[in-house]
Amino acid sequence: MQRLYDALAPVHDPLVRGAFMVFEQEHEASVRERYMSRLELGSLAARPDGRPLRVLDVGIGSGASLPLLRRDLPEGLEVELWGCDLSAGMLSQLEACLAREGDRSTRFVQADAHALPFASGSFDRVFHVGAINGYRDPKMALAEMARVAVPGTPIVVVDEQLDRSRPNGWYHRAAFRLVTLYDRTPHCPVELLPRGAYDVKDEAISRFFYCLSFRAGG
């Protein structure tokens, strides 16, 4: 998967936008809007000790979620935006994007989601979009996201699953299989959540994507 994303990095975003229009018949941005509310960014408030709040995007890619984060954060609140990704190619696209926007505050690091290089309880929001179904060990990655999150904070995970509540014809089933060839059984990994996970919510946010949110360590 790392080599695949490195190779596709220069054309990744246009391919994703095109795939949404062809297979989902809607804009990528519309689907992204549906998971943002799960992060509950509007409820963030300054810490009494003055320490900046921190938000982590695991698998940040080229930073497609950053504009939505900046938009939904409370005005005037000091928040550090962090990202990590295993693909050097995708991070190079992110770096170029941040340079174009003049963004010198967003921090990012090349890292494996199975072993996040951050202290426990160091992020006030943690989320991941679009790759966990292809991870070597999704259970370990979910445990790592829970570990680095402040206890009780929302953790949001989005990836591919065919929405069984909709009528899916041969075209939809074939298209879904085409875009998920890397995974034998693409689905929402509720059964892999860390022990003690609570406030678990699992919903389809489009024909091909689920949104899983939970809290841990409360």
Image (cartoon, rainbow, N blue to C red):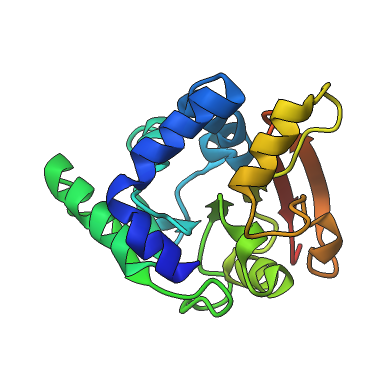
* Residue 28, percent from left and from top: 49, 29
Q: Name the residue at 51% across, 69% down.
A: 122
Q: Is residue 116 visible?
A: yes
Q: Is residue 77 visible?
A: no
Q: Nearer the viewer, residue 8 or 159?
A: 8
* Left or right: residue 191 compared with residue 53: right
Q: Nearer the viewer, residue 80 or 46?
A: 80
* Left or right: residue 73 compared with residue 171: left
Q: Name the residue at 32% across, 64% down.
A: 108
Residue 2: quarter of image: bottom left
Q: Quadrant of the C terminus?
A: bottom right
Q: Nearer the viewer, residue 161 or 193?
A: 161
Vertical arrangement, residue 44 with respect to residue 142, above or below: above
Q: Name the residue at 63% across, 60% down.
A: 182
Vertical arrangement, residue 182 with respect to residue 29, above or below: below
Q: Total label count?
A: 0
* Left or right: residue 106 compared with residue 73: left
Q: Nearer the viewer, residue 18 or 213?
A: 18
Q: Name the residue at 43% across, 63% down.
A: 4
* Residue 10, percent from left and from top: 27, 51
Vertical arrangement, residue 165 with respect to residue 54, above or below: above
* Residue 75, percent from left and from top: 36, 32
* Residue 90, percent from left and from top: 33, 58
